[in-house]
Image (cartoon, rainbow, N blue to C red):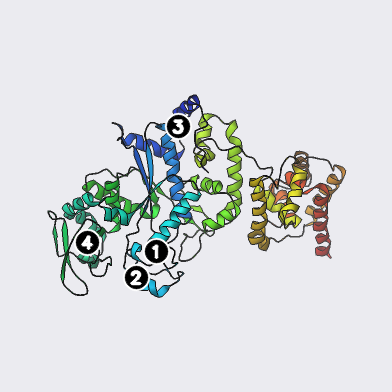
Amino acid sequence: MFTGLASLSSADLALLAAEASVSKAWPFEEARKLIARYADGFPAHGVIFETGYGPSGLPHIGTFGEVVRTTMVRRAFALLRPDVPTQLIAFSDDMDGMRKVPPHLPNQEALKAALDLPLTRVPDPFGTHDSFGAHNNARLRAFLDSFGFDYEFLSSTQCYRSGRFDATLRLVLERYDAIMAVMLPTLGTERQASYSPFLPLCPRTGKVLQVPLTARDPAAGTISYADPETGESVTVPVTGGHCKLQWKVDWAMRWVALGIDYEMAGKDLIDSVSLSSKIARILGARPPEGFNYELFLDENGAKISKTRGNGLTIEQWLRYAPPESLAFYMFQQPRAAKKLYLGVIPKAMDEYFQFVAAFPRQTPKEQLGNPSFHVHGGPPPAYAPPVSFALLLNLVAVSGASDAAMLGAFLKRYAPDCDPAGDPRLKAMVDAAIGFHTDHVAPTLKRRAPDAREAAALRELADWLAANPQSDAESIQNEVYEIGKRHAFEPLRGWFQALYEILLGSPQGPRMGTFFALYGVENSRRLIADALSDTVVAGA
């Protein structure tokens, strides 16, 4: 998916970098925040980006969105400051206690017995890894690798146990009162009485405990609490994996300990980002740059919820469209609420290819605003399918093409130079069009009969096609326009709406001249004749 800037000359890179310094494309705006952050000079290790992941479930389309958007910012920064190294950390919160058992998992009884254990100590219900956390971490890494992301994976458990967080954890203990002053006003009265930023791991059971502290010793680096089952006083160090932190404090601690410079988050975490930023400052560090992206909506405008199952899975998207089209969709207006459902896939794929096709003709300024530049981290690989995915869907609908060979034959007649069988990208589009139509379009199609004016216009169109059988798509399109005008369709889009509903059974459709040329004049005339026969039946 990512081709990068390696193919560009130094002169071209310099020209693009100059344009990028003022580009209004959001990845460049974000990248300039990082340049301003280090106006006095960058650290030797460069700039560190982070994305977070909760491994109590599998990676999903939101995971992809956060990583691909962060990668877009990272690549924009690299164009502006190629001399500064960058790193992307994919961080797994796998030391969190498992608070509930997901109902869809096997071995429910074994999982129930492991409640409150860190995810990396919960048995793997699938039996493939040492723990449930390790299983889902492996799925995350395989997921990210499949898209070609460049990242370093970090495990919360490993960071806590290895001592990587020790110095910052002792700092949290030292500044405990200031952190509590930030956190307590955000909690209810009952929660305030028991809250502590530290969650000790019980030496007796291994469970992650949410208990009030009875004592703390910053000099020794220890906390004390009463065992909730035995009542005995227990003292444990806050270092070495004997404790973890409540997540908002944990987030801030991680920023400080790992030196995170950039992390984005969903709009639902705005308050959490604000709190964690305050805590990071208490710990003596500057919180990372970033922005809050808007969450997705379903087809009806409701928020997507895993519990309700009203979202779109990444597997569903990739069944019908390449990952570049999904990255394109993620690039578009990240701060605006967008609907994410099956119906957006054809449009996203076609628009992606339109931007790819436009790229060579654009100025450097326009290229930096072209989504395909950010999808690929540089100039996109040149590719222009002979027809749009939407047009393929309409062709499947009217032709009844149920296999790739039949659909490929239509394509070869329309575009003789294309290779529906030998071009992997075109073959994937053809297969996807057949699958998408069968799965989601066919059940919704309902052709209607034309009224008298529409029938007259259709007869004229059929006669013109019979008299001009060798016409190309543009000539046919022009005549379709003229027929609509002659039959007084006002506005003219009403004529095209009628064509879509009568011939295709859909409220929207393709450029009709292209469609008729692709489907063939004789086939198109038969399609119109079938529609006109419905008129006779309807008027009988």
Q: Nearer the viewer, mark 2 or mark 4?
A: 2
The residue at which mark 3 appears reads as 20
Determine whether label 2 and label 1 are within 8 Å by CB.
Answer: yes
The residue at which mark 1 appears reads as 132
The residue at which mark 2 appears reads as 114
Kind of residue at badge 1: Phe
The residue lying furthest to the top in this view is 11
Determine whether label 4 and label 1 are within 8 Å by CB.
Answer: no
Mark sitting earlier along the chain (3/2)? 3
Q: Nearer the viewer, residue 342 or 109?
A: 109
Residue 127 to residue 520: above or below = below
In percent of width and height, residue 344 lies at 57, 53
Q: CA distance from mark 2 to mark 1?
A: 10 Å
Relative placement, left or right, of 50 versus 350 is: left
- Disc 2 element: loop
- Disc 3 element: helix
Kind of residue at badge 4: Ser
Quick one: label 4, few (<14), some, or many (20+) residues within 10 Å? many
